[in-house]
Image (cartoon, rainbow, N blue to C red):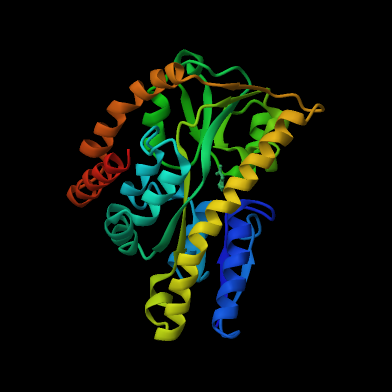
Amino acid sequence: YDWRFVVEETEGQVQYEYAQEFAERLNEKTDGQVNIDVYDFGSLGSEVDQVEGVQQGMFEMGIISPGFTGGLVAEGQVFSLQFLFPDDQEVTQEILNTSEALNTHLVELYEAQNLKPLAFMSEGAMQWTGNRELRTPEDFNGFKMRTQSSPLMLETYGAYGADPSPLSWSELYVSLDRGVVDGQENPIFFIEDASFHEVQDHMTISNHNTYVAMVTINPGIYNDLPEDIRTALDETVEEMRDRGFEIQDQLNEELLDSIVNDTDNPTEVIELTEEERAEFRELQLPIRDFFRDEIIGDEGREMFDLLLEEIAEHE
Ligand code: 6CS
């Protein structure tokens, strides 16, 4: 088997490092029967093109951010709801690993669109960067916020009075530099590695959401695998759960230091207090109802209600 595994990130970033290690482990487990080439972001089109590539089987595997599938599987936008998962990243990863709502119900909704999520992984807590200080919801008034292509983000950022616009990350650095957009959200490792801090003067440690990505495979490819290969693949997915967590944890920690110590590109870093975070959280609560009542269907509601229960059990 010669597979193409496409990721939305480049060397040194979480998805790429995850995919490389996944490829090595699966190759070893199958005595060389499965050879995976990892394709980093850029050469194969936008994030949305990559989603289509996995759906069509042009790429056997891909790491996909649900934020780029908002038009395809409305329920996947659950990951754009801010302040939904616990702040503790380990607890959140535990929910992502074990949730029946996600690993059974949401997976089925994706499978109906010819994408099979094998795992949901945290790439870390998300932070805001901006060309001005972002400390209160009012600071977002009229703020041109870059988002992924998830229609629900119009609501989540609209709740702060911001003006969200979807962009591929390939265009983000230039857009921030030229003021086409005023700011963006991402985990710290990505802000540093994509050098957004060079063109943004402020970073807010808001931990307003967890960046979740899905490790996916084309369902036709998966279903046609002989049992021994499929078992090896499933085992690799299990082994990589902890590794994925470790990779993001280490990168997020190391690269925060690089942002703080980059004297050539000074960035004012502020950390929100719990009181300040509560103001944002309050404004996001009605968006959950909007998502539940207006965006998703009956199957989606079953998934979402179960997920809320699972989260409550972990809190
Ligand atoms: O902001 C984005 O769109 C990108 N952020 C991450 C952490 N990974 C890939 C994604 O395209």
Decide if residue 45 is in sight here.
no
Q: Quadrant of ligand 1?
A: top right
- Furthest residue in direction left, as rendered: 298
Decide if residue 169 is in sight here.
yes
- Count numbered badges in the picture: 0
Q: Quadrant of residue 20?
A: bottom right
Quadrant location, the N terminus: bottom right
Task: State the residue in front, 172 or 230.
Answer: 230
- Furthest residue in direction top, as rendered: 138
Task: State the residue in front, 304 or 278.
Answer: 278
Q: Quadrant of residue 151?
A: top left
232 over 105 or under it: above or below: below
Q: Which percent across, then down, holds residue 23?
A: 59, 71
Specify whether 218 is left or right of 2: left
- Furthest residue in direction right, as rendered: 264
Q: Which percent across, then down, holds residue 134?
A: 55, 19
Residue at (39% x, 82% y) in the render: 224
Specify whether 193 is left or right of 135: right
Quadrant location, the C terminus: top left
Residue at (34% x, 43% y) in the render: 78
Q: Which percent across, then down, holds residue 56?
A: 45, 68
Q: Which percent across, then down, holds residue 155?
A: 36, 30
265 over 142 or under it: above or below: below
Task: State the residue in front, 5 or 47.
Answer: 5
